[in-house]
Amino acid sequence: MAETSPIRPTDDEARALARRLLDGARFGALGVRDPETGAPVVTRIAVATTPDGAPLTLISDLSQHTRALRADPACSLLVGEPGPKGDPLTHPRLTIQAHAAFIDRRGPGQAALRAHYLAQQPKAKLYIDFGDFSLVRLMPTGAYLNGGFGKAFVLTPEDLAKG
């Protein structure tokens, strides 16, 4: 008996749903590896997007996930929250595999990314300029979209880019 893959071919509807999930996210679950033990660690972070649609976050050097990303920039980000009714597993969610790139505070483009982040996360104005905070761009390397029951897709970085 031939095995049927549960993964559907990626189409424009899947790409649009992934974009809506990412563009609408104001927080997400960030997965990293603990640099001392190698064990997985998941934490909640604030999420925004860059002008080209990549996830962008602001994190403190005091946090465990910042130390983990500095040691190993490979990470994943889960966005998409269950609705108020029904089985949470029937609601769409997007897992993005990414490479974390810390933005130099004095580097080119930092001021524009700072303004873009604050437009989406205005309360961060209280601490964005603290010395221990850094903007971090999560550069997608791949993604998995679960669009609800029986709607699974594998996406590329190009599928996630704003066109």
Image (cartoon, rainbow, N blue to C red):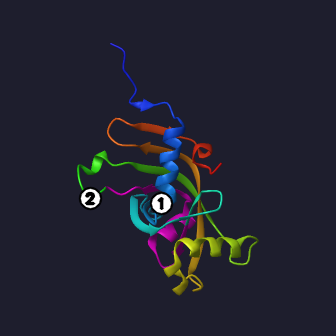
Residue at (62% x, 71% y) in the render: 116
The answer to whether mark 2 and mark 1 are in CB contact below 8 A is no
Residue at (34% x, 35% y) in the render: 150
Residue at (49% x, 30% y) in the render: 9
Question: 24 left or right of 132?
Answer: left
Q: Is residue 97 magenta?
A: no
Question: In the rendering, which numbered label is found on residue 44?
Answer: none
Q: Residue furthest left?
A: 86
Q: Which quadrant holds the N terminus?
A: top left
Question: 77 left or right of 141?
Answer: left
Q: Callout 2: helix, strand or loop?
A: loop
Q: Residue furthest top?
A: 1
Q: Nearer the viewer, residue 155 or 32?
A: 155
- How much space separates mark 2 and mark 1, taking CA atoms? 16 Å
Choose the circle earlier in sequence order: 2 or 1.
1
Q: Callout 1: helix, strand or loop?
A: helix
> Which residue bears the numbered disc 1?
24
Looking at the image, residue 132 lies above or below residue 18: below
Counting from the top left corner in percent of width and height, residue 23 is at: 52, 58
* Amino acid type, residue under disc 2 in the picture: Pro
* Magenta span of residues: 57-82
Q: Nearer the viewer, residue 132 or 89?
A: 89
* Circle count: 2
Counting from the top left corner in percent of width and height, residue 27 is at: 44, 66
> Which residue bears the numbered disc 2?
84
Counting from the top left corner in percent of width and height, residue 56 is at: 57, 65
What is the crowding at mark 1: few (fewer than 14 residues within 10 Å), some, or many (at least 20)? some
Residue at (46% x, 61% y) in the render: 25
* Amino acid type, residue under disc 1 in the picture: Gly
